[in-house]
Amino acid sequence: MGKLAHSDVVHLLVQLSVMLLMGRLFAEGARKLKLPAVVGEIFAGILLGPTILGTINPHWFQLIFPVPSTSATVLSGFVQAAVVMLLFIGGLEVDLHVVLQQGKKALATSLLGISIPFFIGFIFPYTFPDFFGIADKQQRVVFALFMGTAMAITALPVIVRILMDLNLFKSRMGLLVVTSAMIDDTVGWIIFSVILGLIGKGHSVSIGSTVGLAIAFVVFMLTIGRWLLNRLLPWANKKLAWPGGVLSISLAICFLGAAFTEYIGLHAVFGAFIVGVALGDSEHFTERAKEIVHQFINNIFAPLFFVSIGLRVNFFTNFDWLLTLTLLTIAFTGKIIGSGLGTRLGGFSWRESLAAACGMNARGAMEIILGLVALENGLINERVFVSLVIMALVTSMSSGPLMKWLLKK
C-alpha cells in the first residue's frame, strides 16, 4: 500500500475539515431560508472555489486546494465514493410494492413524463449543436441523447420531501407522483449508463456485452438478489452488532454492485442505484436502518460532493445567461407538458395535474450528479455544466411553492 507524503496528509485533512464545516454552515443557512440544504452546500463550494476565493486571493485557494497534487487525487476518490453512496440512498427511496400497486396509471404518467421531456431535450441540442458548444458534429447525437436524459430525469428525494411537507405523500396524487418519479429515475439512469458506454471509457467489454450484462444484473438483483438479501439481513440483525452490522453489509454490497457495473462499462452509480432498489425493498431493512444510512451519508459524504461542485469550475466565467435560460425553458416545458398530460390521464383535474407536474419538475441532486459524471467523461463542457447546476437548483426551489400555490387555488 502506498503512503501519502506528510504535506499531502496535512492538505487532505485541512480540505476535508474546511469542506465539511463550510458545507454544514451554509446548509443550515439555506434551511433557515426554507431552501434545500444542497443549495447552501453548493454555494459553500462556490465561495471556496475559483469563483470567489480563487478570484479574490488565488494564493489562498492554491494553498488549500493545490492542483495537481496527491491530496487532490485522494479527495477526488472521496468525492467518487460520495456519488456512489448518494445514488445508493436514492435507490433506497424506490418502493417496488408501490410501483406495482399503482400499475397502469403510474406507467402512463411515467411514460409521458419521461418521453416528452426526453424528446424536447434531444431535438434542440441535435438541431442547434453550435449553440450548445458542440464543435464535433459526430458527437452531437450522443450529446443530444445526454441532454434528453438530463431533461427527463427527476430528483426522487426532493419530490418525497416536498410531498411530505404538503401532507400529500400518502394521498392518491402523491403515490402516483412518487411512483412515476421512481420509474423515471430508473429508466433515466439506464439510458445514461448506455450513453457513457457509447462514448467509450477504455473498457474491453463491447457495447452489446455491456447492455446484456447490465440487463442481467438488474434482473438478478431484483429477483434472486432480493431473495438473498431477505435471507442475509435477518442473520445480520440477529448475529451482528446493530446498527453497525447492517450499515457495513449494506455499503459493502453497494460498493460491490458499483464495482461490477463500472467494470462492465457502465458508471458505478448505476450499480449502486440498483443495489439500493433491491435492498430498500427488503422487509428486513427497517425504516430505522434506512434513516441511519441516510444520516450517515447525507451529513458526511453528501456535503463533500456538493461542496466539490463549486471547486471544479468558475461559475462567473462559465455562466451563459442565454444557455441557462434555454435549459430552464426546456426543462419546465418538457416536464410540465409530459407529466401534466400523464397525470391528467390518471383521472386528476387539470389543476392537480399541473401541481403534480411541477413536483416532478424538481431535478436536485440527481441532475447535478448526472452533469458531473458527464463533465468528467468529456461529454459536456464547463459552460453547459454550470447551466445544468443552476437549472437543477431553480427547479428544486420552485417545485414546492408552485405545487402549494396551484393546490391552494
Image: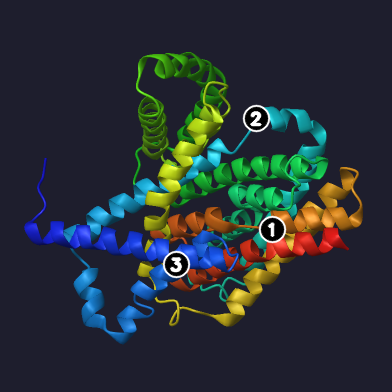
Q: Residue 406 at what x, y percent from top left? A: 83, 62
Q: Residue 250 at what x, y percent from top left? A: 42, 30
Mark sitting on residue 140: none
How was the colour assigned to the protein in this rendering?
A: rainbow
Q: Nearer the viewer, mark 2 or mark 3?
A: 3
Q: Residue 81 at what x, y percent from top left? A: 35, 46
Q: CA distance from mark 1 to mark 3?
A: 25 Å
Q: CA distance from mark 1 to mark 2?
A: 22 Å
Horizontal relation, residue 163 to residue 26: left or right: right
Q: Residue 227 at what x, y percent from top left? A: 53, 16
Give me the residue at 48% from left, 74% from top: 383
Q: Which residue corresponds to mark 2?
A: 96
Query: What amino acid is at disc 1?
Result: Asn
Q: Which residue corresponds to mark 3?
A: 26
- In the structure shown, which secondary structural element does the residue marked by tag 2 occupy? helix
Total number of numbered discs in the rendering: 3
Does residue 238 lie above or below 5 as drawn? Answer: above
Query: What amino acid is at disc 3?
Result: Phe
Point out the image quarter for the C terminus. bottom right
Quarter of the image where one finds residue 96? top right
Pointer 1 or 3: first along the chain: 3
Q: Nearer the viewer, mark 1 or mark 3?
A: 3
- In the structure shown, which secondary structural element does the residue marked by tag 1 occupy? loop
- For the residue pair 270 and 210, the one nearer the viewer reads as 270
Marks 1 and 3 in Cβ contact (< 8 Å): no
Q: Is residue 19 visible?
A: yes
Q: Which residue corresponds to mark 1?
A: 361
- In the structure shown, which secondary structural element does the residue marked by tag 3 occupy? helix
Point out the image quarter for the N terminus. top left
- For the residue pair 113 and 156, the one nearer the viewer reads as 156
